[in-house]
Amino acid sequence: TGRKVSNKILAVFNQKESRYRWLKLSSIPFFHTDENTPSGVFTQFEDISDRKEAEETVKLLTKAFEAAGNGIAITDRNGNIVWVNPAFSQLTGYDSKELEGANTRLLKSEETPKALFDDLWNTILSGEKWQGELVNKRKDGSLFNEEMTITPVRADGSTITHFIAVKEDITNRRKREEELLKLNRALNALGHTSQALMHATDETQYLSEVCNIIIQDCG
């Protein structure tokens, strides 16, 4: 047709490799000076299969991260948020637009000791994975317990450029554990109270023993 074609993507099946190869096609027609119909076409093919497969992998991983039940965030080396999945927004109360570009300090509460944060940053900046529990703060100010894993990402195999954080809300689990602990303390106190009753010689001694049991077993 005499028209230039630029960056047309073609999928060609390679029988020898039993796979499709992705090609980028560019073509330019050439003419003799006295003709309107092209005499030929300069055509260039570029194999972009590796790049195309990498793009498809990124798309697949993005969909998987978005569908994950745990909160996932990607930050730069300084803790500035680059991307979050919907579960992360649901956990923290912030939508993605509010979070992207913000620093993770936005979620920090006073309930987590500074020493724990120091250990976290020292670990991940050294290239190691960090796992632990934090008490963070939602947008509405409420606190939540989270179990978190942070993994460093190396762009060229050596330089750390980003971190991937995976968070799980364990607030309800911690509440159940605290309730179970209180119940166990109450049962222990009840058992000790029964023993005190059996050994007490008078009411005054019994009440004194009961007070000591409550202090020791129930705090």
Image (cartoon, grey):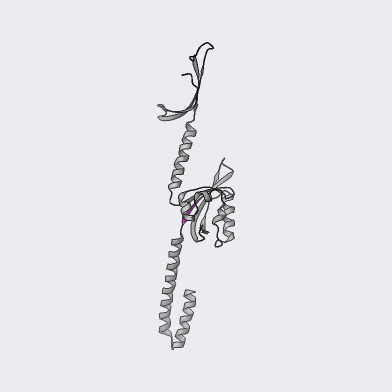
Q: Looking at the image, which is closer to me, 100 or 168?
A: 100
At 48% from the left and 84% from the top, the residue drawn is: 208
Q: Looking at the image, which is closer to me, 175 or 28?
A: 28
- Asked where in the image residue 60 lies, by quadrant, the reply is top left
Q: Main secondary structure of the magenta part?
A: strand
At 42% from the left and 84% from the top, the residue drawn is: 199
Task: Count the numbered circles shown.
Answer: 0
Q: Position of residue 218 (x, y in %)?
A: 47, 74
At 44% from the left and 72% from the top, the residue drawn is: 185
Q: Position of residue 163 (x, y in %)?
A: 54, 48
Q: Looking at the image, which is closer to me, 210 or 106?
A: 106
Q: Is residue 10 magenta?
A: no
Q: Position of residue 8 (x, y in %)?
A: 47, 27
Left or right of residue 206: residue 163: right
- Asked where in the image residue 108 lies, by quadrant, the reply is bottom right
Q: Looking at the image, which is closer to me, 197 or 148?
A: 148
The span picked out in magenta is 164-168
Q: Is residue 167 magenta?
A: yes
- Asked where in the image residue 156 lies, by quadrant, the reply is top right
The furthest residue to the top:
34
At 46% from the left and 54% from the top, the residue drawn is: 90
Q: Is residue 187 above or below residue 61?
A: below
Left or right of residue 111: residue 210: left
